Amino acid sequence: KTFLFLDPTDHVCVDAPFGVGDGTQKDFQLTRPFGFSGGYPFTEPVSSPKVVTSISSALGGVITHPAYTLKEDGLVSFTSPPPAGAVLSWSGEFYYRCRFKEDTIDMNRYFPKLWKVESLEFVGSLGVKI
């Protein structure tokens, strides 16, 4: 069983690019840049957006906010295809889909009706599979 986790240190995108229009494609998956030391060499799909505050399209320095539908899995469906060369970006927050690493948990009882867990590990992904 999986659950959604809001990482307090990594859950926000601001004007994150997620595609380039070609004049025919209408559906684009939200992505987010990922990297270290100020560089962003990777992008990851965002399949569990918490909230999307804006979706924009920029072509030749002109920014528009086209009509779209956002599906629960982070797929953006534009009413009309973005023009060829338009850079698509989004701002908002996202969750990581997680599951516990083990099927069992070792707990120690230290008072009546009080239990303690030394560690609880989970693994996560921005995608739908983990």
Image (cartoon, grey):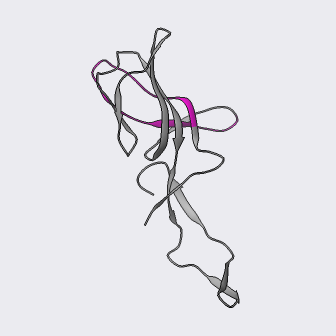
Where residue 14 appears, as percent x and y from the top left, is 57, 31
Taking the view exactly as shown, the residue that stands out farthest to the top is 60
Left or right of residue 103, residue 75 in this image: left
- Give the position of the C terminus as an image quadrant: bottom left
The answer to whether residue 19 is magenta is yes
Near-viewer residue (32 or 4): 4
Q: How many marks?
A: 0
- In the displayed structure, 27 sits above or below 71; it is above
Where residue 70 appears, as percent x and y from the top left, is 37, 37
Give me the residue at 38% from left, 45% from top.
73
Magenta region: 13-37
Give me the residue at 30% from left, 21% from top.
81
Left or right of residue 119, residue 31 in this image: left
Q: Main secondary structure of the magenta part?
A: strand
Give me the residue at 60% from left, 67% from top.
121
Give the image quarter of residue 82.
top left
Where residue 65 appears, as percent x and y from the top left, is 43, 21
Taking the view exactly as shown, the residue that stands out farthest to the bottom is 112
The answer to whether residue 70 is magenta is no
